[in-house]
Image (cartoon, coloured by chain):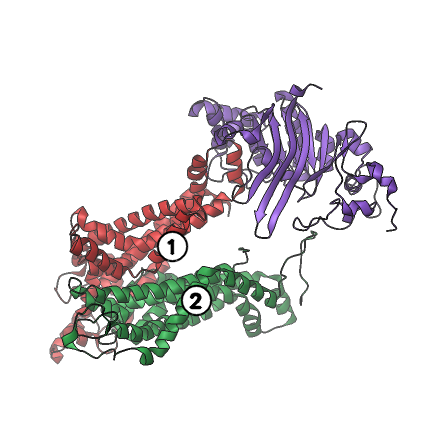
Amino acid sequence: MNEPQLQPATGTPVIGGNTRAASWKVFYKKLSKNKAALAGALIVFIFVLLALLAPYIAPYEPNKMQIANKLQGPSAEHWLGTDDKGRDILSRILYGSRISLTVGILSTVLGAAIGIVLGIVSGYYGRWVDSLIMRICDVLLAFPGILLALAIVSVLGASTVNVIIAVAFFAIPTFARIVRGSTLAVKKLEYIDAIKAVGARDSRIIFRHILPNITSPIIVQATLYIASAIITAAALSFLGMGTQPPDPEWGTMLSQGRSYIRQAPHITLFPGLVILLVVVGFNLFGDGLRDALDPKTKK
Amino acid sequence: MNMFVFILRRLFQTIPVMIGVTLAVFLMMHLIPGDAAKIMAGENANPDQIEQMRENLGLNDPLHIQYLRFVTNAVQGDLGNSIRTSRPVTEEIFSSRFAITVQLALIGTAAAVLLGLVAGIISATRKYSAADVGIMLVALLGLSLPNFWLGIMLIYLFSVNLGWLPVAGWGTWEHMILPAITLGTGGAAIIARMTRSSMLEVLNQDFIRTAYAKGVSDKVVIYKHALRNALIPVVTVVGLQFGGLLGGAVITETVFAINGLGRLIIDSIRAHDFPMVQGTILVCAVLFVLVNFLVDITYRLINKRIDLN
Amino acid sequence: MAKTVKILEVKGLRTSFFTDEGEVKAVDGVDFSLERGKTIGIVGESGSGKSITSLSILRLIEESTGRIVGGEIMFKGENLLQKSKKQMMAIRGNNISMIFQEPMTSLNPTLTCGEQIAESIRIHQKANRKEAWVKAVDMLRHVGIPSPEKRAKQYPFELSGGMRQRVMIAIALACNPELLIADEPTTALDVTIQAQILELIKKLQEEMGTSLMIITHDLGVVAEMCDKVAVMYCGKVVEYADVKTIFTNPKHPYTVGLLNSVPKHDQDYEGDLAVIPGAVPSPFNLPQGCRFAPRCPHARGICREELPELLDSADGDQVRCWIYSEKWEKQEEEVR
């Protein structure tokens, strides 16, 4: 152990110790035992792979219309059938994974980055800066559910880029609050006072001591947030406020399929199933990460 | 006495939030890239018409004057006129749409709470059983479902194929079933998970052992001793759910063609009817803030232990 | 000694917990008995299995992890381990009651103190809500809580630790039980309050004729309260004797060690208190022979190889130590 530790004076030694290497070992052990989390990671990995390889594995051009083949059910040529304009649904879903994953991950990273900065500033400096930032978060959280994103898109206009911005905005208060809470908790630790007394600069304390200590909740939150970001983005597109046709976005595809629900329910069915699957993947993985990073769970 | 002070203080805290919300909604119009008046007057408007629109919207005054006017008018129930229908925004909102959306959100919340609580309790009391695993799996799916897709699939199954329930619209109880499920599923999943973990935590506490030592039966321990305590954190989630459902109503109303606030927002965004968008979003946000206020007070009432701090 | 006088007789009790790492024999063959109206103390360090023994008697071991795997618990001549779930419920809080260590967490925070006492009365006695409440208030007065009518309507958080423990006692004694089990009843309390609570328990015991079983690590409590003492170490009773014998003529080296680590009032200590060297062994890795052997100053070869039986001594006491067996003299003395 690198640093001396305070331990209760019982005979039993603290198992695992507190060094970073040891805690990562525990983390990997816990995570590799969690089958649900591994399944989630596998799903996510497969979708990332499909998105990267879409141009090579998609059987058709995603936007190529073959009106003669429209509204066909699943068949040997078109595994998932065709839509109202005779486009191959499997190919569109494969290309759609590029949009959904990009939007989900980018908006989360963007929102988390801003949220982390605000959260640390808020928690570390406190006083009026803290009050101001927290009130801004309150205001952002006062717009229920998808309404904030809708308001932003209504101002900026409907497009994939604006969806990323809108969903990212939505993420800011969530991350800011979590990071602020963790920062406050870390700041209270005695050794931070000791480092301060030695004369360390704020930036050093933040980057060397606070940030590494709050990564776990951020990683967990980010993984879970990607799941809801993908749903929100698809919902915006479904409402016509996101990615515009003919781009093969899952929500857009679903929305177009609605009109043909009687003749060709598969147009609506498959994109929805794919959204469900990818979101389940991120949720399982995120839950697993949380359990593995939580010091309270032992198994 | 103490409670009264708490309510006053909590009420006071909502003031900056309200100011922030009105400011944000007000600024929406001014953040539109390009000329708001031009967009709202329509593509074929001539310069005179655009100038007239600008004058009508008061866009020629300094910003802070405009904001003050916006708030003063809003407090008096004047949110401007709809560009599409020329009727007052508040009239459009409160004629019937507001009631429909609140109704929808309440039914959705009720469905979520009922399903979620029952599932969560069953799960917690039969930890690691087949029922528990099954319920938690369904909850995971419920959490991960895009509800617009769920709504369409429910319509396909129950309305198109089986013909049991109406495809769309609002009015009778039959109309409410599918929207309530669509809207409530996500919340039910969250409440079920929350109830389960909260129950499991409470069942491990010392006072549960005390109750058993008194000769209390399993049932009474679960429903009287454990549930009472386990529900405390769940209440907060329920409150948040209600707000989330107000937002979710946008999607549900679109899927089921229900003429509520959500559909009004979407139609107004499409028609560039900005006063209407502003007004509806403001009303939803204020409603949400009020609900959270009530949730906090309820939370305080049932959790008397907070008094300690 | 007639058998009927014994209110509680524990024979060969074994309780285990089943974890991923294997079986933990928390209680591993424990015997003792208690005469009506008397007090027995179960003494040991944490991890000795003394609390699990008490929970086993009321069959409050959590089913998901632990199980009573053997033995008999005879209460008034009937084996509690053969009772149905329903029969046990009728016994708990009525014939046998229990007080727990943590008064801060052992009361339900969402119910008033009065409700929690009345609940027990309503379960076991045919009392309606009102009668039960009146009796609950009576109980509060009985355990020495001032203005009981007002306190009954208060929630646990509004009471101090000592007050809460009084409420716990009121709950436990509400139905006039024949046996009261007190699991470290004073450990979590301030020193001044400790004496008051012990005195209260003693007073009520005499008034109501209750038999008492006290679980404690505090030999001071034992001296104050008990008639008989069972010293436990690693799930086994190592010495079972009269309270006088324990203090004047302790036999087991562990008991001696415990006594030496207690400061005595009439002595000024200048040096350190004698502390038993070493630590309680891990339940997953118990020594093959006597479980105390690794820490015992007298241990010889046989101690490490073979677990000693409980040996009866002439005065009716029992001790689990090779020193008192015939084999001992044959053992070579070791140089430590």
Crowdedness near tag 1: few (<14), some (14–19) or many (≥20) residues, C-alpha within 10 Å: few
Instruction: In the displayed orientation, state which residue is furthest to the front.
Output: A76
Q: Position of residue B155 (x, y in %)?
A: 20, 56
What subunit carries mark 1?
Answer: B
Classify C127 as above or below B17.
Answer: above
* Quarter residue A240 falls in: bottom left
The quarter of the image holding the N terminus of chain C is top right
Q: Is residue B206 left or right of residue C315?
A: left
Query: What color does chain C have in the rendering?
Result: purple
User: What's the residue type where badge 1 is placed?
Assistant: Leu
Q: Is residue A166 left or right of residue B49?
A: right
Q: Which mark is residue B137?
A: 1
Residue A291 vs residue C305, the one in the foreground: C305
Q: Is residue B127 left or right of residue B11?
A: right
Q: Which one of the lettered chains is coloured green? A: A
Q: Position of residue C308 (x, y in %)?
A: 76, 40
Same-chain check, marks 1 and 2: no
Residue B23 vs residue C224, the one in the foreground: C224
* Quarter residue A174 falls in: bottom left
Residue A164 vs residue B141, the one in the foreground: B141
Q: CA distance from mark 1 to mark 2?
A: 17 Å
Please tell me which residue is depicted at 77% across the width and 39% down the height of the picture.
C255
Residue C300 vs residue C54, the one in the foreground: C300
- Residue that numbered label 2 is attached to: A41
Label 1: element kind: helix
Please tell me which residue is depicted at 59% across the width and 67% down the height of the picture.
A20
